[in-house]
Image (tube, rainbow, N blue to C red):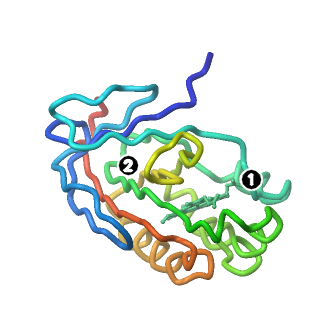
Amino acid sequence: MHDRTFTFMGGEVGAWDVTDMATIVGESLPSVPHVEFLRGVESASDSRSWVLRGVTSNQRYVTRAEQEELVAIQPTLGRAESTRAALIPIRKTDEWWRLSQDERRQIFEEQSRHIVTGMRYLPAIARQLHHCRDLGEPFDFLTWFEYEPEHQAAFDELVHALRATEEWTYVDREIDIRLTRGSARS
Ligand code: HEM
């Protein structure tokens, strides 16, 4: 079976070097020099300071038209020249989770323009969304992005724009971890 579980481990070892780690809101995560990003379930070990797990899942909010647009332009992960990455674990408030699906969609897209805004940054930014709310994890989402060094400023602009939206008033824990690796993929 195709494994939809992904594990992120922060610690002394890992293919990605941490260049910056900022707590945007809520409780921080211990600072680490490296992050490993693997498909499947990995257990914690002494060299890991934290282990976060999530699963890729079906989409919740996109309309058919948006899905078609996304599929047409979104790149896949693992492009050799994408030597920069961001791991941004996010938790949303209880208030968010008490909303109905149609209320959440209203805030997410009609008010906050998450998809319209994000789409402007494709195909420069490759993304993968992992869900973890139902796994008993400390975050609801582990968001992962890969891009070339020359798109760093564009990515910063996108993150800044999203954090100013109505959707982000429902975010109560967010850590922004920036990463880099050599272009020879391990
Ligand atoms: C690169 C451009 C981006 C695009 C095209 C994009 C697009 C999307 C789409 C289509 C979804 C909805 C998936 C669904 O229907 O379930 C989504 C969800 C999400 N995105 Fe983005 N996104 C982008 C960037 C970002 C960034 C930079 C962040 C974090 C700083 C982020 C955080 C999230 C989160 C947390 C969710 C889950 C929201 C929820 O289910 O409540 N996205 N994104």
Q: Residue at x 30, y 39 (%)?
A: 9
Would you say the beta carbon of the disc 2 residue lies within 8 angstroms of ligand 1? no
Q: Which mark is residue 60?
A: 1
Q: Residue at x 20, y 59 (%)?
A: 19
Q: Residue furthest top?
A: 1
The C terminus - image quarter: top left
Q: Residue at x 25, y 37 (%)?
A: 15
Indicate the position of residue 57 as horizontal and vertical percent values. Answer: 65, 40
Which amino acid type is marked by label 1?
A: Arg
Report the mark closest to the observer, 2 or 1: 1
According to the picture, the residue beneath numbered tag 2 turns out to be: 82
In front of the other: 38 or 45: 45
Distance between mark 2 and mark 1 Cα atoms: 27 Å
How many C-alpha atoms fall within 10 Å of the one at disc 1: few (<14), some, or many (≥20)?
few
Indicate the position of residue 74 as horizontal and vertical percent values. Answer: 62, 51
Which amino acid type is marked by label 2?
A: Ser
Secondary structure state at the residue bearing disc 1: loop
Q: Earlier in the sequence, mark 2 or mark 1?
A: 1
Instruction: Place residue 132 in its image quadrant.
Output: top right
Residue 121, compared with residue 6, is above or below; it is below
Indicate the position of residue 133 as horizontal and vertical percent values. Answer: 56, 49
Residue 55, compared with residue 113, is above or below; it is above
